[in-house]
Image (cartoon, rainbow, N blue to C red):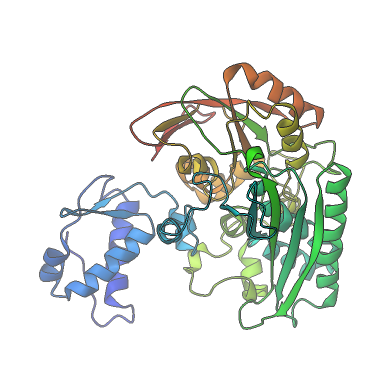
């Protein structure tokens, strides 16, 4: 292909290459599976350095637009994660996992979280699990609400988000005893005064108390507030959780063929929640925020986004926080700020009543519906009967034009926890979930395959395949 290089343009040559190829892919000039010209050929035809072309190709690969093939150059791939990656976020964190996978896998390789020997108390029959996560960019939406209304209590939900993203990952290794959690608040003190910190602490303590009322033995271990105005224009809320448990009680995620996949809904109102949940969780909020909210927020609050992001991807939606969300009873702000649901009360009871039947637990967080691909070996995951797509995700897809196959990699799309059990145990899982007011159903099954792969059918009759 011929790329028109403008040497007088202020845009760097490698960026011109990126933009030209990206545009060609978006318009269909370059089709899925089509081979790009070699680096050497493209450099020669356009009279530019091979290193410049190589740099552009590497950036296109990071965006998920092309992939390198051994000795055969680059080919166009499905643009999964295109908009997400262009905003500086990775859906699958493959570059992180390529490093982490080289490290010690702990005492139980394949478990949902890394499990170590019991370094804390030295008991050879026990193990330690430590986990760190946070509310992500959802805290920025709370910041926008706070700036517009002056209501700091919105950060109560952000405190819950940060805790749940740790707690519900720990559930997936079967944690059933005491959990100690510590919070870290990184803020710009000029924009987030003491009342914001107070609300986050109050929200954290209140939510932990609610969990204990439900039989979840979680306790506060204090935390840290750091004033880091050079790092953030608003506020970042993270947590770290640690637990000790018996090795024999672990859920090892030994996912095999011929298991049923039961999904626990992310929407509705459980009997331990005070409000109905939109299903949003704490993943994909970078895209949700920019795709739904209008340029009003970019103009008024430039501290809430990265100036390196392409302008047409920054707050490019039609809504303000107080606008009604189509197809729902929520406003846009209410839908985006629904606190992330914890499934801890349900999972605790499942582990107590049917420990032998539970073969795997997967929290559909980073990677969303494709998270399962990281677990088991030689498994074909088939998800053929998902929950109806919640209104908040339909709205994001509608206004952004994001491909559906990308949506399922970024958002939970209706269920955020999966339980893998033998077929005869499905009804028992559904019954236990219903005791807590949470909808559950068999969303799929597993079968043997040469490598891990996922086939997903949505409610519109589309079929997507992931590897």
Residue shown at 58% from the left, 18% from the top: 423
Figure disc tally: 0
Please identify the quadrant where the C terminus is shown.
top left
Can residue 50 be spotted in the picture? yes
Left or right: 59 in relation to 3 = right
Where's residue 185, x and y in %? Answer: 72, 71
Relative height, residue 200 to residue 407 (above, below): below
Relative height, residue 466 to residue 332 (above, below): above
Left or right: 81 in relation to 417 = left
Residue shown at 83% from the left, 47% from the top: 211
Where's residue 56, x and y in %? Answer: 29, 68
Where's residue 120, x and y in %? Answer: 68, 60
Where residue 380 sits, quadrant-wise, is top left
**Depth order, front residue of 374/367:** 374
Where's residue 207, x and y in %? Answer: 83, 53
Please identify the quadrant where the N terminus is shown.
bottom left
Residue shown at 71% from the left, 69% from the top: 184
Task: Point out the residue furthest to the top here.
Answer: 424
Where residue 287 sits, quadrant-wise, is bottom right
Left or right: 44 in relation to 448 = left
Left or right: 294 in relation to 16 = right
Relative height, residue 467 to residue 331 (above, below): above
Can residue 415 be spotted in the picture? no
**Depth order, front residue of 393/375:** 375
């Amino acid at each position: 292909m011929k790329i028109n290089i403008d040497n007088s343009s202020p845009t760097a040559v490698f960026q011109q290459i990126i933009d030209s190829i990206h545009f060609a892919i978006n318009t269909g000039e370059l089709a899925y599976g089509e081979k790009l010209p070699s680096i050497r050929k493209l450099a020669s035809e356009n009279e530019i350095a091979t290193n410049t072309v190589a740099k552009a190709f590497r950036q296109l690969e990071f965006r998920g637009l092309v992939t390198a093939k051994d000795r055969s150059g680059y080919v166009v791939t499905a643009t999964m994660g295109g908009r997400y990656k262009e905003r500086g976020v990775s859906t699958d964190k493959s570059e992180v996992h390529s490093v982490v996978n080289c490290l010690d896998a702990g005492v139980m390789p394949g478990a949902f979280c890394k499990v170590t020997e019991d370094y804390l108390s030295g008991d050879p029959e026990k193990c330690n699990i430590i986990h760190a996560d946070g509310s992500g960019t959802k805290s920025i939406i709370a910041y926008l609400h706070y700036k517009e209304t002056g209501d700091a209590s919105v950060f109560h939900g952000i405190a819950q988000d940060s805790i749940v993203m740790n707690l519900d990952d720990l559930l997936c290794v079967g944690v059933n005893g005491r959990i100690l959690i510590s919070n870290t608040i990184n803020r710009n003190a000029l924009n987030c005064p003491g009342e914001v910190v107070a609300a986050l602490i109050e929200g954290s303590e209140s939510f932990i108390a609610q969990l204990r009322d439900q039989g979840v033995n979680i306790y506060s271990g204090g935390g840290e507030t750091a004033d880091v105005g050079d790092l953030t224009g608003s506020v970042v809320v993270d947590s770290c959780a640690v637990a000790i448990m018996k090795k024999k009680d672990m859920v090892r995620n030994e996912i095999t063929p011929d298991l049923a996949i039961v999904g626990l809904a992310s929407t509705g109102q459980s009997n331990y929640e005070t409000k109905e949940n939109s299903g949003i969780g704490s993943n994909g909020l970078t895209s949700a925020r920019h795709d739904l909210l209008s340029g009003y927020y970019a103009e008024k609050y430039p501290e809430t986004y990265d100036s390196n992001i392409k302008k047409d991807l920054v707050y490019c939606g039609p809504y303000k926080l107080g606008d009604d969300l189509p197809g729902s009873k929520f406003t846009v702000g209410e839908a985006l700020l629904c606190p992330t649901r914890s499934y801890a009360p349900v999972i605790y009871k499942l582990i107590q009543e049917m420990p032998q039947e539970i073969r795997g637990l997967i929290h559909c967080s980073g990677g969303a519906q494709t998270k399962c691909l990281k677990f088991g070996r030689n498994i074909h995951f088939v998800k053929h009967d998902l929950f109806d797509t919640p209104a908040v995700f339909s709205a994001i897809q509608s206004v952004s034009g994001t491909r559906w196959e990308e949506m399922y990699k970024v958002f939970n799309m209706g269920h955020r926890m999966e339980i893998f059990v033998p077929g005869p145990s499905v009804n028992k899982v559904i019954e236990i979930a219903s005791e807590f007011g949470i909808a559950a159903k068999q969303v799929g099954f597993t079968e043997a395959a040469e490598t891990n792969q996922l086939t997903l059918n949505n409610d519109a009759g589309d079929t997507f395949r992931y590897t």
